[in-house]
Amino acid sequence: MNPTKGGDRGEAERVIALMVLAAWADGRVEGSEAFAIQRLVSANPLLAHLRPISAIADETRERLREKGMDACLAEACAALPDRTYRELAFQCCAKVMGADRVFPVEEESVLRKLQGLLGLESGDAERLLVLATR
């Protein structure tokens, strides 16, 4: 385990990768979405002390071009065995998607896929979505 402040570096980077994928869900990244990622990472001690976000984002975009959205989502979610990080990922992705105040069908689809891939029951997903709007 590569610790961040009380967490796992690999899982933390997967959460950030999922946020980047969430930002790309509708085919483009808005400035408000990129800013939301920065804000979420700097505000959460589980995501602290990692490589630069830009490095993680560049790697994620490259994988997205090579493998496509579904494969990237599955790969990143599979690397999150800890429930705390799975819930954090879902909540953060919802916040990133809502940052531009537009929620197109592509983002809705990615959020549903995330819920399934992260093994979240609908009640848990609803609770996390409520938290994401705060």
Image (spheres, rainbow, N blue to C red):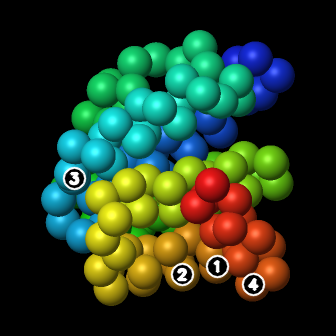
Q: Few, some or many C-alpha atoms within 10 Å of disc 1 (few <14, some 14-19, many ≥20)? A: some
Give the mark nearest the N terminus, 2 or 3.
3
Distance CA(mark 2)–CA(mark 3): 19 Å
Q: Residue at x 39, y 26 (%)?
A: 53
Q: Are marks 2 and 1 in contact (CB under 8 Å)?
A: yes
Distance CA(mark 4)–CA(mark 1): 9 Å
Q: Which mark is residue 29?
A: 3
Out of 101 and 35, give the one closest to the viewer: 101
What's the amino acid at mark 1? Answer: Gly
Q: Secondary structure at mark 4?
A: helix
Q: Nearer the viewer, mark 4 or mark 1?
A: 4
Give the mark nearest the N terminus, 2 or 4.
2
Which residue is label 2 attached to? 112
What's the amino acid at mark 4? Answer: Ser
What's the amino acid at mark 2? Answer: Arg
Q: Few, some or many C-alpha atoms within 10 Å of disc 2 (few <14, some 14-19, many ≥20)? A: some
Q: Which of the 4 image quadrants contains residue 50?
A: top right
Q: Is residue 128 above or below residue 1?
A: below
* Horizontal and vertical percent position of residue 85: 72, 47
* Horizontal and vertical percent position of residue 16: 49, 40
Q: Residue at x 58, y 61 (%)?
A: 133
Q: Nearer the viewer, mark 2 or mark 1?
A: 2
Q: Secondary structure at mark 3?
A: loop
Q: Are marks 2 and 4 in contact (CB under 8 Å)?
A: no
Q: Residue at x 42, y 62 (%)?
A: 98
Q: Secondary structure at mark 1?
A: helix
Distance CA(mark 3)–CA(mark 4): 27 Å
Out of 100 and 45, give the one closest to the viewer: 100
Which residue is label 1 attached to? 116
* Left or right for 92, reference 60: right
Q: Quadrant of the N terminus?
A: top right
